[in-house]
Every structure is written in C-alpha cells, then in structure tokens.
Image (cartoon, coloured by chain):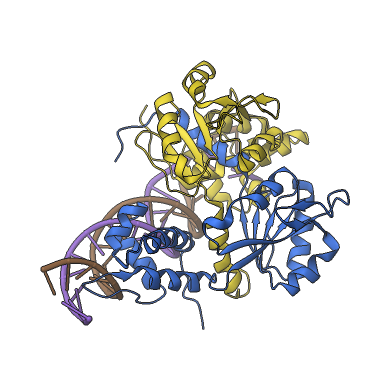
Chain colours: A blue, B yellow, C brown, D purple
Amino acid sequence: MRKKKIPEATIRRLPVYLRELDELTRNRVQVTSSADLAGRTGFSSEQIRKDLTYFGAFGTRGVGYDTALLGSQIRRILGLSRGLKVALIGAGNLGTALARYSWETHKDVVIGAIFDADPAKVGERIAGLSVQPMSRLPEVVAENRIRVAVIAVPAVAAPGVLRQLTAAGVEAVLNFSPTKLSALGVFVQNLDLTMELQSLAYYASGEEEGAK
Amino acid sequence: MRKKKIPEATIRRLPVYLRELDELTRNRVQVTSSADLAGRTGFSSEQIRKDLTYFGAFGTRGVGYDTALLGSQIRRILGLSRGLKVALIGAGNLGTALARYSWETHKDVVIGAIFDADPAKVGERIAGLSVQPMSRLPEVVAENRIRVAVIAVPAVAAPGVLRQLTAAGVEAVLNFSPTKLSALGVFVQNLDLTMELQSLAYYASGEEEGAK
DNA sequence: CACTGTGAATTGATTCACAGCT
DNA sequence: AGCTGTGAATCAATTCACAGTG
C-alpha cells in the first residue's frame, strides 16, 4: 500500500474537478471529456488526464468520463465518501463566520464541533452548535472520528492548540492564524490572510503585459 | 523595466520573510542571515538568498542582512511601502469577519471600503466603515487609488462583481466565492474554503511515513 | 475515429557548490 | 572567517506526441 508520491498540486486540483463534475451531474450531463473539463477549469486536458491516472484509469477511450462515476472516484481518493466532519477551534470573528459559511454548496464538508478556550464563549450557539470548552476536545474528536481541524485563534494561542489537536489524533489542520505552524505527523496548511493580500499587492503594482 | 519572470512561489514567500523580519526588528535585532531566516521560516537558506537576488543584492557578504532595511526593501518590492488599501465586496458573514479581522498585526494592509449589493446592508457600520452601495464603487476606487479587492459574495454574484471591479480599475483580486474567476488584465487569486478542506481530507486519510 | 492513458521531452523550480566580498 | 550571490546540476511538474482501445 505504498504511496507513489503524488504532487501536492495534483491533490489541490482534484476538488476543482469535483466541483465541475458535480455541476455537470446536477445538470444531467452523464459524460464529459478531459478537454471539456479543461475548458471549465482552465487546466490543460493532459494535466487533467495525468492527474487522474496517478490514481487509476477512470475513463473510456474514445468516449470520455462518466461524470457521476468520476465524481465518486475523486471523493473516494480524497477520503470524502463518508463526508468530512471538521472541528473548528476559535469562536471569534473569523471562527464564527467559518461556522456559518455555507459549506452546503458541497455537502461533503461539515463543521461538526466548535471549541473555544474562553469560558465566556463556551455554551454560545453558533450555526446550530454549542461552543465547547477545549477540555472536551479529545473526547469529541474521538467520538466523531474527526481527522481534520481548522484553527481560527490568535497567533499566540495557535501552537498550543496545534499540540492539543495532534494529541487528540487530528491528522490535518487548516491554520488561519498568522504564525507558521508545523508538527511531526500532522499535515498543516497555513493560510494567513494578511499574507495573501500582501502577495496580491505585488501583482497590483507591476503592470501586466498582454495576457497569454 | 522588463520583468524577468519571477516565480509565483517566490512572491508568496516574501510576506513570510517580511513577517519574520518585522518580528526581529521589533525585538531590536539589527542583523540576520539567510540561515537564521531559514530556521524561522522552514525554507532553505539558498532558497531565501535566491528569492532575494531576483530583486537585487540586499545583504553584506560575511555579515548578513540588516533586518529593518531588508524589511523595507521587501515592502517596496511588494508595493506595500505606502500601505495597501483594499476594497471588500460583500458584507455577509465572511465579509463582516474579514472586515473585523485584525489586519493590525501587519498594519500594511487595511480594509478601506466595504460594498454590498443589498440595499438593506447599505449604511450598516462594520469595523468603523459604513457599507456602501455598488454604484459608488468606481468613485471610491478612483478616489482612494484602490488596486486590490476581496470578493466575499455568493458564487452567482461573483462574475458580475469581478466585471465591475476590473471596470473600476482594480488590478488584483482575492476571490473567496466558490467559482473559479478569471479575467484579462487582472490577477485573480481564488480561495475556495470548501476546496481547502477537501484537499486536506486527502492528507488525513493516508497515513504518513516517518517525517523527513 | 475520438478520446484516454502514458512514456519522452521540456520547462521550471530547488538545491548544490563555490567564487567573491567585507 | 563568514555569509552572500550565482552559475551549474538536480529534481519535479507540465506539456508533447502518439500508441492503445472501445
């Protein structure tokens, strides 16, 4: 069962394919092609075929891909087949907005529990969930088999939260706090909103030449 | 003044360097080295030196880099020297949280104006700003020389908003809506929160081998 | 005969290794 | 002596080009 080293870029494209496949399936389109998906996603058709063949052969030569079938294969690859229940740490501005965010678009992802270290926040109801104290984290993570968490706490608190999450058995984390977090045995995706805008500034100052 | 094609990955690392340099400067550390920054950021020292030399030679051989000076050079490269005033479109859950987000950490970035298409939202006060109608967009963008915008509206509304932003002269956009947006002459960074979590699911299902 | 799947070629980014200053 | 700056070498990802197949 050894993994053959799949590029992270490939993994990040799979949800894009999934989004388009779901859209096609909703519209009762049963078959698509790498060229059609290329048009919809902006990636090249070869790239799409190459990405998919890392995981197997899902198409029919001369025909294309069954939209519903390919969609469910991608769900299986990503580990979304049984839905993804996520723990959210931090019930501040950003945390609250994330909890209320319409994850429904793709109902694979659902916020399953919200935690906050502040006793004043505990018990508060957000998006149908009651905010829990950090002490309940290990129990709730275990009970719900939660493998993914979102950190939306201030930078100073973030490393401690990451430690608690790994101790509780969480395997992947999306970190919104402005610190670079990392730890052995967990996959951490850092997403600092300030940095996102700072790098955008670069593209806003330099003039573009004619587009490709 | 031709640009020599700088990797996007390099641009995205510059804000990380800047964060550490600011931290060092705050702590009255005047000199650092690529090896020290490597330790703090997790990137390799060669990578850091290579990234910086795309833009010039900012260090002193045998010594290192002046923290404050390198910081201000990176600000200049990114176009942050005079601060970055950003327009936010959409005053829903996510938009409101973004407006209230503590951009203060690095005070380069500031939300300068908030817009919403919903007349019921217009006039509402969020984070000290009054929500404006979309009709005021061209005027406000021009007056404040706004070059960067954040889209936090539903997917259906997003393409129209992008059109209005480009018409108003905005040059770079961070798009939180779950649609892949693109247009000629604007740099669009798509950031779909559902997709971020979907790709994390992949890393949560497959077991890790021992870390590098 | 259209479209997938895939080795081979290419392009791009990272790492190596060392020459050049201070 | 120490650390930067950089061409050359390596490694990774993308694109090309076509053989394979329903």
Quarter of the C terminus of chain A within the rendering: top left
Q: Nearer the viewer, residue B22 or A28?
A: A28
Taking A166 as reference, is A129 above or below it?
above
Q: In this orientation, does residue B8 appear?
A: yes
At a point 44% along the width and 73% down the height, the residue shown is A73
Instruction: Kindly give the residue lying farthest to the right in the view shown.
Output: A119
Percent of width and height locating residue A200: 51, 37
Q: In this orientation, does residue B63 appear?
A: no
Percent of width and height locating residue A69: 39, 73
At a point 51% along the width and 45% down the height, the residue shown is B177
Percent of width and height locating residue A130: 78, 57
Side of B189 relative to B44 (left or right): left
Side of C15 relative to B27 (left or right): left
At a point 79% along the width and 47% down the height, the residue shown is A156
At a point 69% along the width and 45% down the height, the residue shown is A94
Instruction: Kindly give the residue lying farthest to the top in the view shown.
Output: B143
Instruction: Kindly give the residue lying farthest to the front in the view shown.
Output: B120
Taking B149 as reference, is A174 above or below it?
below
Percent of width and height locating residue A131: 79, 56
Side of A182 relative to B79 (left or right): right
Number of marks drawn: 0
Q: Nearer the viewer, residue A89 or A201?
A: A89
